[in-house]
Image (cartoon, grey):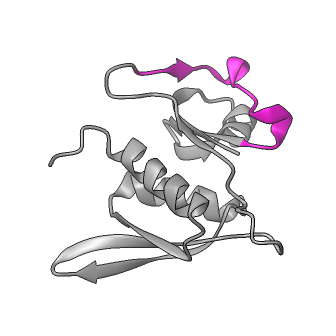
Amino acid sequence: MAVSDPIADMLTKIRNASQAKHEKVDVTASNLKLQIIKILKNEGFIKNFKKVTKDDVTYIRIFLKYTDNQSPVLHGLKRISTPGRRVYCGYKDMPSVYNGIGIVVVSSSTGVITGKKAKEAKVGGELLCTIW
């Protein structure tokens, strides 16, 4: 079965694995997914990630992060821009997620960055997803 929105599929896999308290989750690899996962790692939402190859297919193995009382660090992942409805935003109108607790991931002309970095660099772009 072909997936029409691979980014939404990745976010759903991470969300479901986090709620089920799995240690890790595998998603098929792509450059855009890798950039989003790097942002998740840099912002402290996941422990780590690594590329894994099984049967000539490359996956990204994501190691999920939990607090001391085993509640997930990731509370929510939401896709904003979809293949059927693209959402773009200028740097002046960049949304805030839960008053700065969460982040928005933006695909800009300088690459895939957080909304905060997009504001600092004064670049807009496509709003990919929110993470909190």
20 horizontally vs 115: left or right: left
Is 111 placed above or below 120 here?
A: below
Q: Position of residue 59 (x, y in %)?
A: 33, 71
- Residue sitting at x 44%, y 56%: 13
Q: In the drawing, does residue 14 fall left or right of residue 39?
A: left
Magenta stretch: residue 85 in it? Answer: no
Percent position (x, y) of residue 8? 41, 42
Quadrant in the rendering for residue 3: top left
Is 95 included in the stretch rendered in magenta? Answer: yes
Q: Quadrant of residue 101?
A: top right
* Closer to us: 48 or 109: 48
State the extent of the magenta-drawn residues as a range.
86-102
Using residue 131 as the reference point, say whether residue 54 is left or right of it. Answer: left
Residue at the far front in the pictured view = 20
Picture residue at 74% right of the left edge, 34% below the top? 97
Residue 16 image position (x, y, % from top left): 50, 56
Count the marks: how many?
0
28 versus 11 height, above or below: below
Q: Residue at x 14, y 49 (%)?
A: 1
Image quadrant in which the C terminus is located: top right
Asked whether, in this view, residue 88 is left or right of residue 43, the answer is left
The location of residue 116, given as percent across then percent down, is 74, 39
